[in-house]
Image: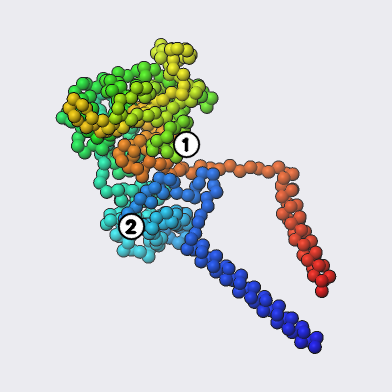
Amino acid sequence: MVFRSFFRRSTRYGLNFLATVFVVLGIIILIEFISVRYNKRFDLTAQKMFSLSLQSKKILKSLVSHVEITAFYKKDQPGRAAIMDLLHQYANESPMIGYSVLDPDRQPAKIKRYNITGYGSIAIESGGESIVIESPDEKAITNAIYRLTRGEKKYIYFLKGHGEKDISSEANDGYKAIKEEMEKKDYVVRDLLLMREEKVPESCALLVISGPREEIPESELKKIARYVYHNGKAIFMIDPYVISGLKEFLAENNIILGEDIIVDKTSQVYGGDPFIPLISEYLSHPITRDFTTPSIFPLARSVSVAKSSREGIISRSLLKTGPESWAETDKEEVENGVVTFQEGRDKKGPISLAATVNLELIKKEKNEEIKGSFVVYGDSDFIDNYHMNLGGNRDLFLNTVGWLAGEKDLISIRPKDIKGGSFVLVTPGQADMCFWLSLVAEPLFVLLIGIIYCGVRRIRE
């Protein structure tokens, strides 16, 4: 009788155990299935180093054609796991992305097809065209995808002949670096000597006037105005104390160029020059959306919006300096390097040093429809070779180019650069506490729970 009772109890416990095992296995299988079909990543790093940038996500979500990415890595090659994780992020963002990681030694046909010359390269293909990247990272991959899927090329012309910044110069004040950044976005960047042309070329998607040192002749100003008023797009970067001839044109369109130079005492707090304002206040606009990185403008003048606005002209400030700044009007003080704020003469901050203008009006005398857009900056040095990579300068300018050229997908922050983190050294007391808690207290606590459980069970039996 006792044996039969023990056998029944053992059988019951065994069946309960098996049922529990099957239930747990079922739950594990269900969780695994859900995780494969509906996986979600969480990036808890401060700089979001394991997430794609906003720009990459915008471009991927706008894709309408398939993009195939092939990475050529050996199985034991360093960096293989990292590139697989990166490509997996791209595929998760868009169903238009497909990818594979192949051993180049076993794929001679594809090596020849893409003209792969070394390990660690990737080939990106779409619409019958392909781009090979030898040192792949997020920035390079996103640029390649955009270049392959955008379609037609857009031409950006930089006016020359009046002392403007040289887009071919490698000197500190040259523009070669920003030119190369635009060319990576598949823009075609050209000089424009307007005195030799009847008008701004029809192919011009954006005209850039970058820091002229001499006055632009009236004949060329008329060509610029005609271009802008016929749905043209332009960026004007006018430095302090320069007579460019553009002041009247801008005033007609609600933009006032100040005869001043901006002084920012906040810059001195960070060890900078008071004549190099630090911009951290960005007004609401597609150019500055999601933009938080401070920008630096060496020797800038104020660019403000006229109080009385003409009908059909929408103008707005784009960014402003802090409250500790002012617009200094005394040129002699500036030249001496010692400036003081003078109430009633200087303008107290915040000071606007960039503005946007959208034109949509009709000239009554000719019944002519006028459309166009442009952005005005009170400085041209902020994107030269020396200053381009300071703060958010590069991103701010490229966002401006993207907005005016109609490239909405490019209006975002570029992929971030990897920065080293920091770790905190613990004191000897803290190290002892970690030892006792993890290696002594926790095991003793688990043992105590086990003893109590066994004691309670025996009492109940």
- Spot occupied by residue 247 in the image (x, y as percentages of width and height): 30, 21
Q: Residue at x 46, y 19 (%)?
A: 348
Give above or below for 331 relative to 445.
above
Q: Is residue 294 left or right of residue 207?
A: right
- Spot occupied by residue 383 in the image (x, y as percentages of width and height): 37, 31
Scheme by which the image is coloured: rainbow
Q: Residues within 10 Å of mark 1 (few under 14, many from 20)?
A: some
Residue that carries the numbered disc 1 in the rendered image: 292
| Quarter containing the C terminus | bottom right
Looking at this view, name the residue that lies furthest to the left. 198
In this view, the residue in front, 408 or 174, is 408
Q: Is residue 167 left or right of residue 195?
A: right
Give above or below for 330 relative to 24.
above
- Spot occupied by residue 241 in the image (x, y as percentages of width and height): 35, 17
Q: Residue at x 46, y 56 (%)?
A: 85
Residue that carries the numbered disc 2 in the rendered image: 66
The total number of labels drawn is 2
In this view, the residue in front, 314 or 273, is 314
Label 1: state its secondary structure.
loop
| Quarter containing the N terminus | bottom right
Give, as a three-letter code, the residue at label 1.
Answer: Thr
Structural distance between the alpha carbons of marks 2 and 1: 33 Å
- Spot occupied by residue 60 in the image (x, y as percentages of width and height): 38, 51
Give, as a three-letter code, the residue at label 2.
Answer: His
Q: Is residue 194 visible?
A: no
Label 2: state its secondary structure.
loop
Q: Is residue 437 left or right of residue 35?
A: right
Q: Is residue 396 visible?
A: yes
